[in-house]
């Protein structure tokens, strides 16, 4: 193998740059030529390629986002789109690919392996931490810390004004970010898609706390919870607003709602994200050099591990219910 490519795809995540740097420098260390693909799969289809040298990844290990840019690309979901990508890879002598992204990006990577016949290795990069086969995805640790920083600030004003805050966190259909940051912030309630909850029970708890003299509350809501509580479906607003309205009505407490949104995806990566990104990037290149294909690199029990990509895509990652329960016990 002489020439490999690397791309980032799907939602960006802090630490993707550290992974790109690692792929490039490990590749160069092994005398490979490394090509950067711009805008994920869109760049494969448009042949938007950049030759990467050591300097092209200087000064990026500390930066959030991705220097290769990211995109969601509908054309890659079609056979025609993927055939264009194949032609471009062949014409540019690309013999192996590293894909940094989430589960959608990995479905694309699986097709590159099995349909196009080009070896591709996945590096899990998403703040959602929703991929099986790894304890951490790149960006998850930074996002947790960003959320905690935001919650600390909200707590200051919640305390001063004796208010209840409903705080919505990202995570798509999963509650990983919400459970962990709920535990770490001491939230009064943690609402996630994986667990049914009784809003009246939560309101009763808030009233009981008020009677004991506790005047402020933090309620963490995962963005993916069912819209069963939507009080104004036509407004297409976040369900957190409906929950805030119901809590205010039923408890009489002054309630505010905050959607943390995309600020959760930005920022300089934490040490953990930089380290796992660096280790995963190196392993991905080593796997290509060893003739491997259709694999995902993971981080389990402090070790870098390798899994079959198709197997990972068919495995559901479950929330750690022990931690979820602990959050409730300690609240
Ligand atoms: P993430 O990787 O963060 O989960 P998406 O689900 O948006 O993000 O997927 C990123 C991109 O991966 C999509 O825009 C598309 O180009 C590609 N992709 C997703 N699913 C498939 C699929 N089943 N087949 C081919 N490509 C896919
Ligand atoms: O997958 C990462 C993520 O940030 C999810 O948590 C969120 O649901 C989604 O991406 C938001 O996507 P977009 O940036 O397209 O609004």
Image (tube, rainbow, N blue to C red):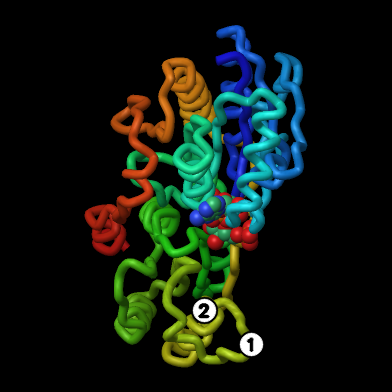
Which quadrant: the N terminus?
top right
Q: Residues within 10 Å of mark 2 (few under 14, many from 20)?
A: many
Separation of marks 2 and 1 at Cα, in angstroms: 10 Å
The structure residue drawn at horizontal position 36% and vertical position 54%, both measured from the top left corner, is 183
Q: Is residue 155 visible?
A: no
The structure residue drawn at horizontal position 47% and vertical position 89%, both measured from the top left corner, is 252
Q: Residues within 10 Å of mark 1 (few under 14, many from 20)?
A: few
Above or below, comparing residue 281 to residue 295 in the picture = above
> Total marks drawn?
2
- Quadrant of res 2: top right
Ligand 2 lies under 8 Å from the Cβ of mark 1: no
Left or right: 140 as drawn, with respect to 175: right
Q: Which residue is mark 2?
A: 239
Q: Please give the label number shown on residue 235.
A: 1
Left or right: 217 as drawn, with respect to 150: left
Q: What secondary structure is found at the residue carrying circle 1?
A: helix
Q: What secondary structure is found at the residue carrying circle 2?
A: helix
Q: Nearer the viewer, residue 307 or 58?
A: 307
Residue 191, x across and y down, in percent: 39, 69
Ligand 2 lies under 8 Å from the Cβ of mark 2: no
Q: Nearer the viewer, residue 198 or 59?
A: 59
The structure residue drawn at horizontal position 34% and vertical position 28%, both measured from the top left corner, is 305
Q: Nearer the viewer, residue 174 or 119?
A: 119
Q: Nearer the viewer, residue 7 or 95?
A: 95
The structure residue drawn at horizontal position 31% and vertical position 82%, both measured from the top left corner, is 198
Residue 303, x across and y down, in percent: 33, 25
């Amino acid at each position: 193998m002489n020439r490999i490519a690397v791309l980032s795809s799907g939602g960006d995540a802090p630490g993707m740059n550290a992974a790109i740097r690692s792929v490039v420098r490990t590749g160069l260390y092994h005398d490979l030529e490394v090509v950067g693909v711009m805008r994920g799969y869109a760049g494969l289809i448009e042949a938007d390629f950049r030759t990467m040298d050591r300097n092209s990844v200087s000064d990026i290990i500390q930066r959030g986002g991705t220097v290769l840019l990211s995109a969601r690309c509908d054309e890659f979901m079609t056979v025609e789109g993927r055939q264009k990508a194949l032609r471009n890879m062949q014409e540019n002598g690309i013999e192996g690919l590293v894909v940094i992204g989430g589960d959608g990006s990995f479905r694309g990577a699986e097709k590159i392996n099995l349909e196009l016949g080009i070896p591709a290795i996945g590096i899990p990069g998403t703040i959602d931490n929703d991929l099986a086969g790894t304890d951490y995805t790149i960006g998850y640790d930074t996002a947790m810390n960003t959320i905690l920083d935001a919650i600390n600030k909200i707590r200051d004003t919640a305390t001063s004004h004796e208010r209840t805050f409903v705080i919505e966190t990202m995570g798509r259909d999963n509650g990983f970010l919400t459970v962990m940051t709920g535990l770490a912030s001491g939230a009064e309630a943690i609402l996630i898609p994986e667990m049914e909850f009784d809003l009246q029970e939560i309101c009763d708890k808030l009233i009981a706390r008020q009677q004991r003299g506790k005047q402020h509350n933090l309620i963490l809501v995962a963005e993916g919870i069912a819209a069963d509580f939507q009080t104004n479906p036509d407004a297409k607003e976040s369900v957190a607003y409906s929950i805030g309205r119901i809590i205010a009505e039923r408890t009489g407490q002054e309630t505010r709602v905050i959607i943390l949104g995309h600020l959760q995806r930005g920022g300089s990566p934490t040490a953990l994200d930089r380290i796992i990104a660096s280790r995963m990037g190196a392993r991905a290149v080593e796997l290509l050099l060893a003739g491997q294909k259709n694999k995902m690199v993971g981080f389990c029990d402090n070790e870098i591990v390798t899994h079959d990509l198709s197997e990972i895509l068919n495995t559901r990652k479950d929330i750690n219910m022990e931690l979820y329960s602990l959050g409730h016990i300690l609240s």
